[in-house]
Amino acid sequence: MPEGPEVKRLAQRLGKVLVGKPLSSVAFSYKTLGSYDQELSSSEIELVDSRGKALLIRFECGKTIYSHNQLYGKWIVTRAGVEPKTGRTKRLVIRTPQHRAALYSASEIEVLDTSALLDHSFLRKLGPDALSEETHWREVAARLMESNFKNRSLGALLLDQSFVAGLGNYLRTEILHESCLHPDLRPKDLSQREIGKLARTILEITRLALKTAGVTNKPSRVKRLKRVGATRSRYRFSAFAREGQACYRCEEKIERLSVNSRRLYLCRICQPGRSRNAGGHS
Ligand SMILES: [Zn+2]
């Protein structure tokens, strides 16, 4: 599933071809949404943005198209008049004189009143967005110590969109590895310093992924690895999908676990578990 940075980049890409352009048509394939075709076609798109992993297309007429791609949804942008070859089911097509932007296979699409966005059942539950400039690491640090979050394992918390919106599976591994924290630890097990470092890392790594199109390894390491001819799949992550390879910090082999039914990668030396305070590594 695309994570916050991928959805934000998609919003930026769609925004470039749709915002402020005259619309030739907006056409839904869902019968229930077809009644909006005309109203939206005669309006103009003001903004394409993301909230966590949801995509929001805001129209001047006061409506917003909300879509959440889940596992299978995909946007395909082509020049006007070009139908991409795909076996996917078409859900929504937005046409301008220059472009055709179409959403395929999404499992959730709704048309909402922009003024009532915050009442939406999914958006209402989202925590602060890691990619919003308004989200400060101190706010994330304070949330870590709130009663509904401080007793939960970090492995679960970092996938929970009501804690911080926009995180996902590869970001979880990368954030924990960079923060030197085991997924079984809970915020209440951490020192003040670790809480601060984790909160900053959550925002830094997610924002780095937005800037680099998903490369979350340290920029200095990426530079060094590129110099010796490493491909993107070799330099992209510091721990994710690196099972059996050496940790960049300590050279221990990276291990793969399943945490909350999703794969997670860690270094047992850099990220000791709960028994760390008793002097051992778990
Ligand atoms: Zn290590």
Image (tube, rainbow, N blue to C red):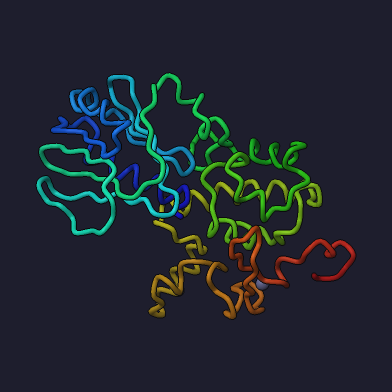
Q: Position of residue 65 (x, y in %)?
A: 35, 32
Of the pair 28 and 135, the residue shown nearer to us = 28
Instruction: Say which residue appears at 42% left-offset and 43% top-offset.
Output: 68
Q: Position of residue 268 (x, y in %)?
A: 71, 72
Q: Position of residue 247 (x, y in %)?
A: 61, 74
How many callouts does the rendering have?
0
In the picture, measured across the screen, residue 158 lies left or right of residue 99, that is right
| Rendered-image quarter of ligand 1 | bottom right
Judged from this view, the residue extending furthest toward the front is 31
Q: Is residue 110 above or below residue 43?
A: below
Quadrant of res 85: bottom left
Of the pair 121 and 230, the residue shown nearer to us = 121
Instruction: Say which residue appears at 16% left-offset and 33% top-offset.
Output: 25
Instruction: Say which residue appears at 64% left-offset and 35% top-offset.
Output: 139
Quadrant of res 161: top right
Q: Position of residue 269 (x, y in %)?
A: 73, 72
Of the pair 259 and 268, the residue shown nearer to us = 259
In the picture, measured across the screen, residue 54 lies left or right of residue 238, that is left
Instruction: Say which residue appears at 72% left-offset and 42% top-offset.
Output: 149
Q: Quadrant of the C terminus?
A: bottom right
